[in-house]
Image: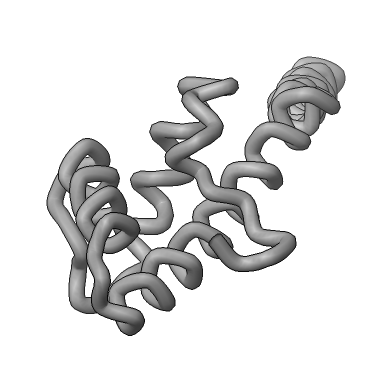
Amino acid sequence: MCHGQIDPLALGKADPQCWESSSALLLEMRKPRISDTVSGFWDFMIYLKSSNNMKHGALFWDLAQLFWDIYVDCVLSRTHGLGRRQLSERKQKNNFTENEKSAH
């Protein structure tokens, strides 16, 4: 393990919704695709981590860091209600538009 890096395989799924969505987003970002499924992606990650090939290890840590960045953004957004706030703002905008239409 590299100093200062977090191994997502050792964490467990603290927030299962963010775990799934972050994994899926990472899969969409990678060209060529690593896997067609989230579970296939994590099987691949386990393979990379357990490999004795240094290039596999480096790829594991690159993907782990990218996953961690996406995952933390998701958890922070959910924790601080950013998703709910955006939904609320849309609802307020729709209500304003409806009220404006009925006033005319």
Please state, as top left, top right, bottom left or bottom right, where the N terminus lies in the image.
bottom right
Q: Is residue 6 above or below residue 20?
A: below
Who is closer to the viewer here, 61 or 96?
61
Q: Position of residue 58 (x, y in %)?
A: 42, 77
Residue 89 vertical position relative to residue 50 in the rendered view, above or below = above
Which residue lies at the image location 21% right of the left edge and 55% below the top edge? 47
Label total for image: 0
Whether residue 72 sits left or right of residue 81 in the image: it is left
The residue at the point 48 percent across, 71 percent down is 62
Q: Residue at x 68, y 33 (%)?
A: 75
The C terminus - image quarter:
top right
Q: Quadrant location of residue 23? A: top left
In the rendered image, residue 40, in percent from the top left (x then y), is placed at 16, 45
Residue ranking furthest to the bottom: 55
Image point 68% across, 43% down: which residue? 72
Task: Give the answer, above or below, for where 52 lies relative to 38.
Answer: below
Q: Position of residue 38 (x, y in %)?
A: 26, 41
17 or 81: nearer the viewer:
17
Relative to 38, is 25 on the left or the right?
right
